Structures are given as C-alpha cells and as structure tokens.
Amino acid sequence: MKNLPIDVLRAFVAISQLGGFTQAGEQLGRSQPAISLQIKRLEDLVGKALFVRNGPNVGLTEHGRTLLGYAEKILSLNDEAFSKIDNALISGKVRLGIPSEFATTLLPKIVSRFVRAHPNVTLDVHCDLSKNLFTKSGQRNHDLILALHDKHNQAGHQYVKTDEMVWVASQTYKVDLQTSISLIAAPNGCIYRKRAVARLEQSNRPWQIIYTNPDLSGIQAAIEEGLGITVLARSTVPGTLKILKPSAHLPRLGKMGISLVKTHKNNNRAVDKMAEYLTSSLG
C-alpha cells in the first residue's frame, strides 16, 4: 500500500493555488529546488505527470486536477485532527480584565466560542475602567487586559482595532438645544467621559454630568429613562439605543484605540489562545 506524504501534498496544493513553484516555496519557507524535488517525488509515487510547465507558469494535468481534490481533503482532515488534539490539551485559568461595555455587548459571543473549543480552560472575567485595570494590583491580578486609550497605538500594547466614539441616547430622546447637555457617564478616569467633556468645552457647549455609574448596565438604564446622553465606542452600542449624528451642538468625538496587554511574560497556552480569540474577534 502506497502512502501520500503530508508535506509533499502541502507543496502540491500550494503550487496549484499560487500558480508557481517559487510562490509556493515562499509561502512554505522552502527553496524552489526543494519544492521541485517534492513534486518529482509525488509524480514518481503516483506514476503520472501532475503539472504542465510553461516557462514560469504551471497548470494542472487531468491527473493533477483529480489528485487536487483528494489532497485538499487529506490536508483538511490532517490539520483538523491536530487542531482538535492541540485544543484538548490546553487547560488552565485565564484572568481577563475588560471594560464593562465590551463585556456586556461583545464578550458573551467570544466566550461561548472559546469555551466550546477549549472546555478545559476556566475564564475569570473582571470588569472595570481601563485606568483601574492598569494599576499595579490590577496588572498583578489579570493575565490579559483589554485596554482603551486615546492614541490609536499604545507602546507596549498589542493593537487590536481603532473604533469611533459616538454620542448615544434612547430611541425617543431629543437634544434640547436651549439647555445644557445632560451627560450620563462613568466616574473620573473614563476615556469616554474625558473625551465628551473635552469636545463640549472646545465647542463652548454648556454641559453637566447628572448621573455617574461605573457599569454599562447602569448607564444604559439611565439613558433608556431619558435622563441624558452618553458616549460609547460604536461597536459596543446596545441595539436598544440610538447613535446621535454629530452637529454644531454635538461635536465629533474622534477615534480611540483598543489594544490587548499580556501582563505576565511566562508562557501560558490558555492565555495565548484567549488573546488570539479576542484579537481575531474584535479586529
């Protein structure tokens, strides 16, 4: 019984997809002569020519097209098997610090996928303002911190995405242009609060903070009661609220950076895998 080597099939599929031996070599980290030897080995093994060579360009023969379908299935099953085994071996505890608006609106979907893929990992999630998460005790008590900051990129942080800050109100709320803006905000140190106050001051628009709550659910409840407006990242706005368009009375708020910080340098596969999930899901 003959066997088709996985590494040779991977080179064969790469050439088929990229259209050349050199391109396949660059993708796989091997020289063009090494790729050519692998294909010669495969053609000798199956006893058929698999490629039609026309200068730098190559195309599949009829036998090559037949083999390609099987090769893709074999590689898919091979990679799936290794992924399943690898995930099953990952275990431990991940302590995640995250702003409450992300925990409420985005984290449940990410966590559900992560837990299904890694049943042996325990997640311990703590919500707080970014400034509190980055205190010495905060960094000591968390493995990963999802951070919000004014700069699009922050030194020492793994960049995830840039998001737009927006004004948010209840579906029926109307801004009274004759009175000061009623703000609902998190305590001092919140990036949304800081940006809202700065932009209103720059535009000489009167304002007052009428309600303070550190948690998004409390802020959302106050907004839904029509007490005022707040500021959030566009991607975290709950579906029950509406985004207000910028105007002469509501200045544009600009953008902010979202990044991920691994607080400990020790190798922890569970922490690394959670970081991958957060980055790919939010990016």
Image (cartoon, helix red, strand yellow):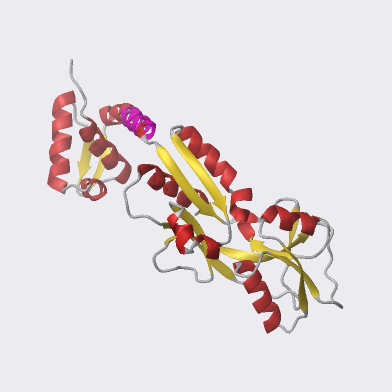
Above-or-below relation of 34 to 145: above
Q: Nearer the viewer, residue 126 or 171?
A: 126
Residue 277 visible to the viewer:
no
Q: Position of residue 103 (x, y in %)?
A: 59, 50
Image quadrant in which the N terminus is located: top left
Going 28% across and 27% down the picture, which residue do you hit? 67
What secondary structure do most residues of the magenta stretch adopt? helix
Going 24% across and 45% down the picture, which residue do you hit? 28
Left or right, residue 64 beside residue 214: left
Q: Position of residue 129 (x, y in %)?
A: 58, 61
Query: Can you tell which quarter of the image residue 242 is in?
Result: bottom right
Above-or-below relation of 79 to 144: above
Residue 256 within the magenta-colored segment of the rendering: no
Going 24% across and 33% down the picture, which residue do you hit? 9
| First to last magenta residue range | 74-88
Q: Nearer the viewer, residue 270 or 42?
A: 270
Residue 84 within the magenta-colored segment of the rendering: yes
Query: Can you tell which quarter of the image residue 159 is in?
Result: bottom left
Q: Position of residue 107 (x, y in %)?
A: 57, 47
